[in-house]
């Protein structure tokens, strides 16, 4: 009985990771560009931008589209430009 419940939870998370909160299918990759300097930004936002792989202004990285990356982008949305590819 417990194994059945656990497998149901695991498989339900797979659909959650491939869809956004509105049920729309997410893109495979995100193209993230740093458009505003992190000078003057709070340290947590600076670390988030660095964790996204962005070091210089107007540099772009491509990252997998998943909940973790979307959360990071949401936190620094005022500093970056995002395109779905």
Image (tube, rainbow, N blue to C red):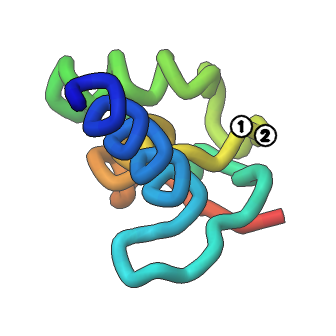
Per the image, the residue denoted by label 2 is 62
Q: Counting other residues with Cα less than 10 Å from the Cα at mark 2, is it few (<14), some (14-19), or many (20 or more)?
A: some
Image quarter of residue 60: top right
Image quarter of residue 47: top left
> 28 or 77: which is nearer to us?
28
Q: Are marks 1 and 2 in contact (CB under 8 Å)?
A: yes
Quarter of the image for the C terminus: give it. bottom right
Quarter of the image for the N terminus: give it. top left
Tell me where residue 65 appears, x and y as whole percent: 64, 48
* Residue 13 visible in the shown view: yes
Per the image, the residue denoted by label 1 is 63
> 17 or 41: which is nearer to us?
17
Q: Secondary structure at mark 2?
A: strand
Tell me where residue 11 appears, x and y as whole percent: 49, 45
Image quarter of residue 34: top right
The residue under the point 78% across, 54% down is: 28
């Amino acid at each position: 009985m417990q194994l059945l419940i656990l497998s149901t939870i695991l498989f339900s998370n797979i659909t959650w990771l491939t869809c956004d909160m509105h049920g729309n299918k997410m893109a495979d990759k995100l193209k993230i560009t740093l458009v505003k300097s992190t000078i003057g930004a709070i340290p947590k936002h600076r670390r988030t931008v660095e964790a996204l792989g962005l070091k210089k202004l107007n540099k772009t990285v491509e990252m997998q589209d998943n909940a973790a990356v979307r959360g990071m982008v949401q936190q620094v949305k005022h500093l970056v430009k995002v395109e779905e590819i």
